[in-house]
Image (cartoon, rainbow, N blue to C red):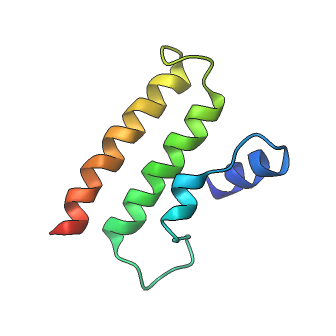
Amino acid sequence: MVQMKKFFEENGAGEFSQYQNLQISPIHVHRSKAEHKHAIFVLGKEIATIMAHDEFSGPGRTSVRMQELAFRTVNEMIK
């Protein structure tokens, strides 16, 4: 997913601000599993949003689902 992010950034297709605001990357081994899981869903949502033509397309539905999963993982991080 990070390579897809890099591809889109290099081609001017996205900023990934929500993911970057998390200040986490795959190499941050000191972060919790829940934080990494949340970051994956946030990044997945942003990638799917870029690929979506509308909210009813396959990537559009994926974007919505990733957002739901990201929201759920916030509760895991609080515990």
Residue found at the very far bottom of the displayed protein: 30
Q: Judge from the rendering whether residue 27 lies leftward or rightward of residue 4; answer left or right.
A: left
Q: Position of residue 69 (x, y in %)?
A: 32, 44
- The picture places residue 3, in percent across and down from the top left corner, at 71, 55
Q: In the image, residue 61 lies at what x, y percent?
A: 45, 24
Q: Tell me where residue 63 appears, x and y as whole percent.
A: 47, 33
Residue under the image location 64 percent in, 34 percent down: 50
| Residue sticking out furthest to the right | 11
Q: Is residue 39 left or right of residue 53?
A: left
Q: Quadrant of residue 32?
A: bottom left
Quarter placement of the C terminus: bottom left
> What residue is at 20 percent from the left and 58 percent from the top?
75
Q: For the point 69% across and 48% down, which residue is it?
A: 4
Report the number of discs: 0
Q: Is 18 situated above or below 56?
A: below
Quarter of the rendering containing residue 74: bottom left
Report whether 2 appears left or right of 76.
Answer: right
Left or right: 49 in relation to 41: right
Decide: is 27 above or below 1. Answer: below
Outermost residue, left side? 79
Position above or below: 76 against 31: above
Residue found at x 47% / y 55%:
40
Tell me: residue 76, above or below residue 1.
below
